[in-house]
Amino acid sequence: MKVLSIIENAFSGLFFLVGISVSLYSVFMRYIVGESQSWATEIYTMLLVWAIFIGFSTALRDNKHIAIDLLYDRAGPLFRKICEVMTLALGIAFSIFIIQTGVDMVLTAYAQGIKTIDVGFPIWINYLIMPIAGTLLFIRFCEKAFRFFIKKEIYTKEQQNESTPVRKVE
């Protein structure tokens, strides 16, 4: 899982930095030099979308997704366990849905031979992030389920921010 974390961080950061660089280059060329670079929009949009979709997995890994704790904080341990199980089940189901939908999109775009307008880049490569991101989310939800059901680790609110699991004693 540490290797996966390094890969996620590296690719997400790389795609983000290159995407922002291409965007800044495009702005410079358009407003300073006076020459529009239409290809740049396609490239930086794709790179930023890839960075964001990989970022979903890293946010899940680090417990950085938006959460509404109003009821959860005031509820008892049984309600919290039920919420955690429901969250894990829905997350795994959503991940599988994203994988299946993404694979369908990739195969359809590949079969149709669709390409981007300015660069002529095969659109199926853009869509490839869907099954990749779904797989990453699936892995992270399975990791969380393993920790919840097998290792009996839970996170307190303060530790969620630090992403440090605590061994629950029953």
Image (tube, rainbow, N blue to C red):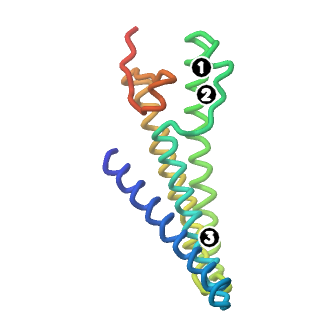
Which residue is the site of mark 2? 86
Numbered circle sitting on residue 143: none
Apparent side of residue 66 relative to residue 158 in the rendered image (left or right):
right
- Residue in view at x 54 percent, y 63 percent: 50
Seen in the picture, residue 37 relative to 105 is either above or below; the reply is below
- Residue in view at x 40 percent, y 8 percent: 170
Label 2 to label 3, Cα distance in Å? 34 Å
Could you tell me residue 133's position as x and y percent? 53, 55
Decide which of 106, 25 is in the foreground and name it.
25
Could you tell me residue 11's position as x and y percent? 43, 61
Q: Quadrant of the N terminus?
A: top left
- Residue in view at x 59 percent, y 63 percent: 49
Which residue is the site of mark 1? 82
Mark 2 or 3: the one toward you:
3
The single residue placed furthest to the front in the displayed view is 32
Label 1 to label 3, Cα distance in Å? 39 Å
Amino acid at dot 2: Met
- Cβ atoms at labels 1 and 3 below 8 Å apart: no
- Cβ atoms at labels 1 and 2 below 8 Å apart: yes
Which numbered disc flags the more N-terminal residue, 1 or 3? Answer: 3
Q: Residue 40 lies in what quarter of the image? A: bottom right
Could you tell me residue 66's position as x and y percent? 62, 37
Seen in the picture, residue 103 relative to 1 is either above or below; the reply is below
Identify the secondary structure beneath mark 2: helix
Which residue is the site of mark 3? 45
Decide which of 62, 78 is in the foreground and name it.
62
Seen in the picture, residue 82 relative to 15 is either above or below; the reply is above
- Residue in view at x 52 percent, y 73 percent: 21
Amino acid at dot 3: Thr
Task: Count every numbered label the image shows and give the total.
Answer: 3
